[in-house]
């Protein structure tokens, strides 16, 4: 436990630090693919939620609309995503992976799976199930807190 922190605060710090170092490790292995830290996460998120509007994506990713807009511009210029008009509201654009983007996501998933395997080395399935359940409860608690 970190000096001067109680068990609950230490756990929060640990979750944050593990997330930070995981992102750093993934960023490092994504570099040869020509993908930046922000791009791999946005592409992966779009692959799971294809067709969201830019506003929805900014909200769900907790990013500023302008920052996400610039990132989407670069991904579109690289041929990885496409902006398509919404069928009900032509003023709104929906973000979709292109064929090239889907291929990049396959590469991202393979590369990040290798990192995840390394990160979870020596952790039993039972311990992983417990950790997942704890994080799921934390997620639900925090979502209730921010939705007030």
Image (spheres, rainbow, N blue to C red):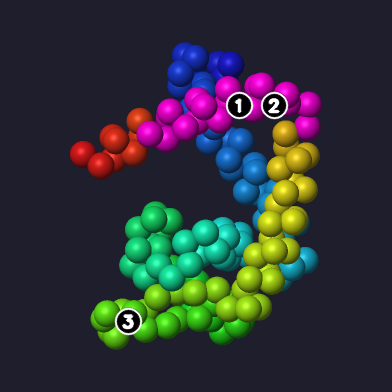
**Crowd around label 1: few <14 · some 14–19 · many ≥20 (10 Å):** few
Work out which residue is located at the far left of the displayed protein and give it.
148
Q: Secondary structure at mark 1?
A: helix
Picture coordinates of residue 5 (x, y %)? Answer: 48, 17
Spatial CA span between label 2 and label 1: 6 Å
Region in magenta: 121-140
Residue positioned 39% across, 56% down in the render: 60
Horizontally, residue 23 falls left or right of residue 120, namely: left
**Which quarter of the picture shows residue 120?**
top right
**Crowd around label 2: few <14 · some 14–19 · many ≥20 (10 Å):** few
Any mark on residue 125, and which? Answer: 2
Spatial CA span between label 3 and label 2: 44 Å
Picture coordinates of residue 11 (x, y %)? Answer: 52, 23
**Which quarter of the picture shows residue 52?**
bottom left
Spatial CA span between label 1 and label 3: 41 Å
| Residue of label 3 | 87
Q: Is residue 10 magenta?
A: no
Picture coordinates of residue 63 (x, y %)? Answer: 40, 59
Give the quadrant of the C terminus: top left
């Amino acid at each position: 436990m970190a000096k001067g922190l109680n068990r609950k605060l230490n756990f929060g710090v640990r979750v944050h630090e593990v997330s930070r170092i995981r992102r750093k490790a993934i960023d490092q292995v994504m570099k040869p693919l020509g993908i930046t830290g922000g791009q791999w996460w946005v592409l992966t998120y779009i692959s799971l939620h294809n067709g969201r509007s830019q506003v929805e994506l900014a909200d769900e990713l907790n990013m500023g609309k302008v920052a996400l807009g610039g990132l989407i511009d670069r991904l579109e210029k690289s041929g990885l995503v496409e902006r398509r008009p919404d069928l009900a509201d032509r003023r709104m654009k929906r973000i979709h992976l292109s064929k090239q983007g889907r291929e990049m996501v396959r590469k991202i998933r393979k590369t990040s799976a290798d990192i995840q395997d390394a990160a979870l080395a020596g952790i039993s399935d039972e311990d992983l199930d417990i950790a997942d359940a704890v994080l799921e409860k934390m997620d639900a608690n925090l979502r209730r807190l921010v939705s007030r």
